[in-house]
Amino acid sequence: MTEESKKIRQHVGRLAVPILLVVFYVWYGSLILELPQGPGEEGPLGPSFIPWLWASLLIVLTLVEIATGNLGARRDKERVVIERKSVLDALILCLLLAGFALLMQYTGFTPAVALFLAICFWWSGIRSWKIILPYVVIFAFVVNYVFHHVLKVPLPQDWLF
């Protein structure tokens, strides 16, 4: 393998995860477009405000990572090594977020947040339901209260409430 081809492979490797994330954000944006854009009945912000805020922040951060070329990589002298676990973690995170967005349409906001957080806790290595359950329930209801009552952002209807 020539030196030129090694440099090309390293450059492509550094950009692989950020490019996958940008593709995911475009898909996520297409889901957000299905939400009402204008002011809701309960406040000046539409239901798409928070998802657009998240997507915008994530896109900016990903573009910064593309510019610096450091996402999912560790420097080994002059060579950049993309670890397989970093790529797998990024893909799993994209699938979890996609599942959260799809689940929210069917179950509503609060149950989707609770399930999403429980899966994230489990994935991060916390396996005790005595720890997971209280955090998930409290956080899901606090987030629901803040978005619905404080920020006045209409949320997808819950089938539990």
Image (spheres, rainbow, N blue to C red):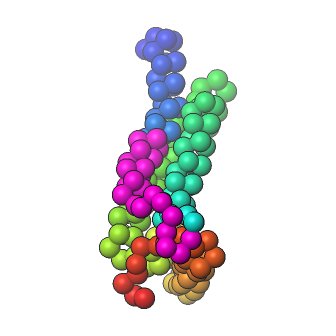
- Vertically, is 120 above or below 128? above
In the visual, does 9 lie left or right of 103? right
Q: Nearer the viewer, residue 139 or 85?
A: 139
Count of picture labels: 0
On whether residue 54 falls in the magenta region, the answer is no
Report x, y in % for residue 77. 67, 27
On whether residue 38 falls in the magenta region, the answer is yes
Report x, y in % for residue 51. 50, 58
- Vertically, is 91 above or below 14? below
Q: Quadrant of the N terminus?
A: top left
In the visual, does 142 lie left or right of 115? right
Residue 67 quadrant:
top right
- Vertically, is 80 above or below 123? above
Magenta residues?
A: 21-43
Q: Nearer the viewer, residue 67 or 32?
A: 32
Report x, y in % for residue 123. 49, 66
Outermost residue to the left: 106
Is residue 144 visible to us here? yes
Report x, y in % for residue 71. 58, 40
In the visual, does 60 lie left or right of 118? right
Going 54% across and 43% down the picture, which residue do you hit?
59
Going 39% across and 53% down the picture, which residue do you hit?
33
Q: Quadrant of the C terminus?
A: bottom left
Going 64% across and 23% down the picture, which residue do you hit?
78
Is residue 84 visible to us here? no
Going 47% across and 78% down the picture, which residue do you hit?
110
Outermost residue to the right: 77
Q: Nearer the viewer, residue 93 or 147?
A: 147
